[in-house]
Image: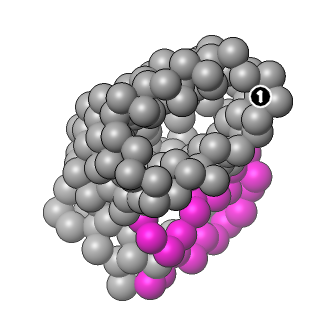
Amino acid sequence: DLNFCYIRAECAAAIAEALRGNKVLTTLDISYNKIGDEGAKAIGGALAVNGVLTKLVLVDSNIGDDGAAALASALRVNEVLTSLDVSNNNEIGSTGATAIADALKGNAVLTKLKLDDLCHLDLPKLRGTDPVESINLSGKALGPASAIVIASLIAGNGVLKTLNLRENHISDAGAAAIAEALRV
């Protein structure tokens, strides 16, 4: 746990370099630091080749669209990460969320994704690989990034009949993504 350690991009790059050769660490939490997009790019590069890390937590780390895209690139090839928490990175917008959503289309290993404060998205249920007919995500303070990912996943879910997103903050961008997914 390296929370609140005043870590910036340069130190995140050093952590990433160590992570590349890591054979034992399964959880890495460097939340509440200012690693930014450059630090996320370094971590993403390491994640692409790491074969043991199953949980990565980067809460409130000043990550934006470029950092999210780098993490998404890693998700395309990583075969062990099951949980990713990038909540409270308010700079992740539609571009970063779309990159993550696209990466998840080919990644069946990641089961938990947290983009907002209150809620891990249960990816198997949203994908339909853990089939349920109803998902209640009301009042979870989900933002547009979560809505974009949800939309991407439910577009291919042939089982889901009810999705409750009441009392969230998905905004126009999130609502548009959900509407597009419903056309499928």
Residue 51 vs residue 121, the one in the foreground? 51
Q: How far across and how far down the image is residue 100, in percent?
A: 42, 37
Does residue 85 lie above or below 20 as drawn? below
Residue situated in front as seen by the camera: 168 or 151: 168
- Mark 1, Cα crowd under 10 Å, few <14 / some 14-19 / many 20+, is some
- Secondary structure beneath label 1: loop
Q: Position of residue 25 (x, y in %)?
A: 76, 35
Q: Residue at x 36, y 29 (%)?
A: 10
Quadrant of the snapshot with the C terminus: top left
Q: Is residue 114 magenta?
A: yes
Above or below for 47 versus 123:
above
Q: Residue at x 71, y 34 (%)?
A: 53
In the depicted structure, whether residue 43 falls above or below residue 168: above
Q: How is the image coloured?
A: one colour
- Asked if residue 182 shows in the view, the reply is no
Identify which residue is drawn at 34% across, 40% down: 8
Q: Name the residue rendered at 71%, 44% in the picture.
A: 27
User: Residue 147's image quarter?
Assistant: bottom left
Whether residue 62 is visible to the viewer of this picture, yes or no, is yes
The magenta stretch spans which residues?
113-139
Q: Residue furthest right?
A: 24
Mark 1 lies on residue: 52
Does the magenta-highlighted stretch encompass residue 101?
A: no
